[in-house]
């Protein structure tokens, strides 16, 4: 699929229309959460006014974190504070990410805690609950980590998930990944270099030419002997751009690579960059060249 | 394209590139005067609940600034930095999750008054420095904030602390906030910064969650990093963050996201030195788990 910026605008309009339709079946405009989400959760009660932020005002709320959301198709955020006994607080944030793929994306770029059994996927640890369902990404942040607060965090999450509408699809690019040896809970989906470098530092420059028009999947594979190999799969708007990106990457990262795109790196593992039409697949830390070749050969590239 | 810093540089152990170190500079015959940075730590500055002991913190500030300027005590050192009759702005940071400790702001104010600055001529501000009369009229600035990682810039330190002086903060966001060093050339700022204090009492070495903050990635380092050169101060802070990340998260996550603005503040904007070979790091006080 070729996605150009104008295409994204059209898609955005279509999704906007769908959003209006689905407002009546759960998952409507974010301000509706004010009426739907309970104001009392155990010994915690809502405090202050609920607030809504959009792409222009998110900086007012996210001092130092807005860019994470703006790198996706973030639409609006709805926030509420709860106060509990002893000065304890909960912060509930519900982010409308436009599509389920984008909601999965923002969730997937920052995973490291055990699942909490909420929504389509979730995690909970150290007072932070994160989950996604449909086009929504949700966080509940607690100021304390005692048992009562932890119970309130999960209870609040369970109340919220009732109002998020139906589950949505994963990004198609994620389904391309070979399942064998895949560490599925480590797969991330994103668009921009900022997200790649927070997930796995490759270069201080944007050598893959990533921007809002690119779709990226970053995955981890068990490479045997306790080792991990990494796969970055990028879908560019067209084959011309993927070719240029591969040339840029090889020139900056592995100029000694063979024509096939493979090079041995300083940790005695292999890096390889492979093209398939608009797709660029790069394997990092493969134990052997054939391991990288096999992984690439097993990718199920979507047909046009 | 010049060789960009890549993951392979870390595999090769050549991460000094991040700090602007080059083969050329290390081969220079006559090395320029080093930029002095003082790292001071005290076991007693925080209690078991991370509550600040203001007296200990005042002593740390005094000792570090005195050593920075080779003066016998903090009062004499501050008299070197500011003069009676001046208007001084303390550019602090109010980020709710990890603000500049009020005890540190108070310690700075105390010494400014001791140096002869009238209390009503001392401004303390973050978000409204562009319009605050005490900052509009300031003849000297003190730059103070906590050290933490930042999703976009890699690290928030003394360089990024001045973004509130910009007419458009977004204008400094492209390319991982590459040009934060240019903030120090804004008319309201240029030539006025007398002291840079990077608070590493409880630095944050990794970020996550909706606001890029999690208590699990903050630790009681109990230190201050002090210098006249904001680039050298931040480069030292970055070394600390990287060392902690390596210790806790492993070598693969040693680097926070692309903190290129520190090197570029040196090589592109010329406001200080990021080259660790040109920084004289003076360490005072408690040295357990000092990491750098």
Image: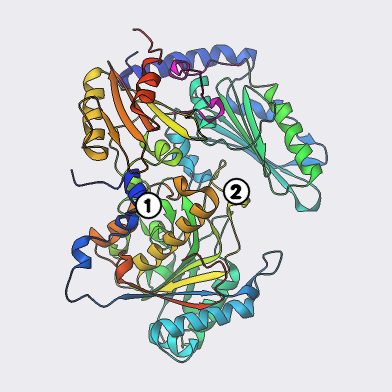
Q: Which residue is the site of mark 1?
A: B259
Depth check: give the residue in front, B291 or B235. Answer: B291
Give me the chain letter of mark 2: B
Depth check: give the residue in front, B264 or B185. Answer: B264
Give x and y (percent) for residue B157: 43, 60
Total numbered labels placed on residues in the image: 2
Q: Quadrant of the N terminus of chain A?
A: top left
Depth check: give the residue in front, B52 or A244. Answer: A244
Q: Is residue B263 magenta?
A: no
Residue B206's tag is none
Q: Relative to A233, does residue B181 appear above or below in the rendering?
A: below
For this view, does A41 lie left or right of residue B94? right
Decide: few, some or many residues near mark 1? Use Cα within 10 Å; few <14, some 14-19, many ≥20: many
User: Who comes first in sequence, dot 2 or dot 1?
Assistant: 2
Give x and y (percent) for residue A153: 73, 37
Q: Quadrant of the C terminus of chain A?
A: top left
Give me the chain letter of mark 1: B
Q: CA distance from mark 2 to mark 1?
A: 20 Å
Q: Residue at x 38, y 50 (%)?
A: B169
Q: Which residue is the site of mark 2?
A: B214
Magenta region, residue range? A167-189
SS for callout 1: loop
Give x and y (percent) for residue B176: 35, 46
Determine if residue B127 is in view: no
Determine if residue B22 is in view: yes
Decide: few, some or many residues near mark 2? Use Cα within 10 Å; few <14, some 14-19, many ≥20: some
SS for callout 2: loop
């Amino acid at each position: 699929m070729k996605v150009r910026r104008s295409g994204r605008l059209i898609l955005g309009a279509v999704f906007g229309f769908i959003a209006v339709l689905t407002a009546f079946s759960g998952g409507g405009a974010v301000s509706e959460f004010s009426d739907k989400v309970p104001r009392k959760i155990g010994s915690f009660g809502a405090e202050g006014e609920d607030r809504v932020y959009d792409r222009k005002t998110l900086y007012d709320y996210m001092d130092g974190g807005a860019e994470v959301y703006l790198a996706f198709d973030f639409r609006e955020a709805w926030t509420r504070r709860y106060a509990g006994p002893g000065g304890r607080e909960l912060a509930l944030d519900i982010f409308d990410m436009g599509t389920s793929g984008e909601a999965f994306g923002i969730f997937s770029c920052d995973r490291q805690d055990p699942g909490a059994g909420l929504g389509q996927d979730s995690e909970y640890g150290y007072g932070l609950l994160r989950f996604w369902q449909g086009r929504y990404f949700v966080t509940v942040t607690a100021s304390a980590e005692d048992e009562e607060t932890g119970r309130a965090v999960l209870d609040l999450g369970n109340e919220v998930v009732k109002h998020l509408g139906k589950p949505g699809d994963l990004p198609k690019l994620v389904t391309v990944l070979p399942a064998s040896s895949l560490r599925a809970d480590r797969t991330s989906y994103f668009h921009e270099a900022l997200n790649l470098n927070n997930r796995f530092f490759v270069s201080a420059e944007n050598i893959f030419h990533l921007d809002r028009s690119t779709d990226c999947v970053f995955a981890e594979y068990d490479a045997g002997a306790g080792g991990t190999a990494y796969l970055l799969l990028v879908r560019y708007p067209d084959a011309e751009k993927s070719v240029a990106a591969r040339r840029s990457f090889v020139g900056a990262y592995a100029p000694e690579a063979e024509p096939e795109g493979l090079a041995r790196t300083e940790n005695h593992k292999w890096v390889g960059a492979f093209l398939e039409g608009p797709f660029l697949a790069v394997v990092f830390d493969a134990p052997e060249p054939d391991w990288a070749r096999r992984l690439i050969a097993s990718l199920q590239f979507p047909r046009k | 394209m010049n060789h960009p810093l890549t993951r392979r540089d870390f595999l090769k152990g050549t991460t000094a590139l991040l700090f602007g170190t080059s083969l050329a500079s290390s081969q220079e015959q006559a090395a320029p005067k080093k930029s002095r940075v003082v790292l001071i730590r005290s076991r007693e500055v925080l209690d078991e609940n991370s509550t600040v002991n203001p007296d200990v913190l005042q002593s740390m500030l005094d000792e570090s600034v005195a050593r920075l300027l080779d003066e016998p005590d903090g009062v004499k050192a501050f008299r070197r930095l500011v003069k009676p009759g001046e208007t001084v702005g303390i550019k602090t940071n109010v980020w709710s999750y990890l603000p500049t400790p009020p005890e540190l702001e108070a310690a700075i104010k105390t010494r400014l008054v001791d140096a002869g600055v009238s209390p009503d001529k001392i401004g303390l501000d973050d978000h409204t420095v562009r319009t605050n009369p005490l900052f509009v009229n300031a003849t000297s600035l003190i730059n103070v904030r906590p050290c933490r990682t930042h999703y976009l810039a890699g690290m928030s330190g003394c360089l990024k602390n001045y973004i509130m002086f910009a007419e458009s903060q977004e204008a400094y966001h492209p390319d991982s906030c590459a040009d934060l060093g240019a903030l120090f050339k804004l008319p309201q700022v240029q030539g006025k910064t007398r002291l840079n204090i990077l608070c590493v009492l409880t630095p944050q070495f990794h970020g996550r969650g909706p606001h890029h903050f999690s208590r699990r990635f903050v630790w009681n380092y109990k230190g201050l990093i002090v210098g006249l050169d904001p680039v050298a101060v931040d480069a030292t802070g970055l070394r600390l963050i990287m060392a902690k990340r390596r210790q806790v998260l492993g070598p693969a996550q040693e680097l926070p996201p692309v903190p290129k603005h520190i090197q570029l503040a040196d090589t592109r904007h010329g406001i200080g030195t990021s080259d660790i070979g040109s920084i004289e790091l003076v360490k005072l006080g408690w040295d357990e788990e000092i990491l750098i």
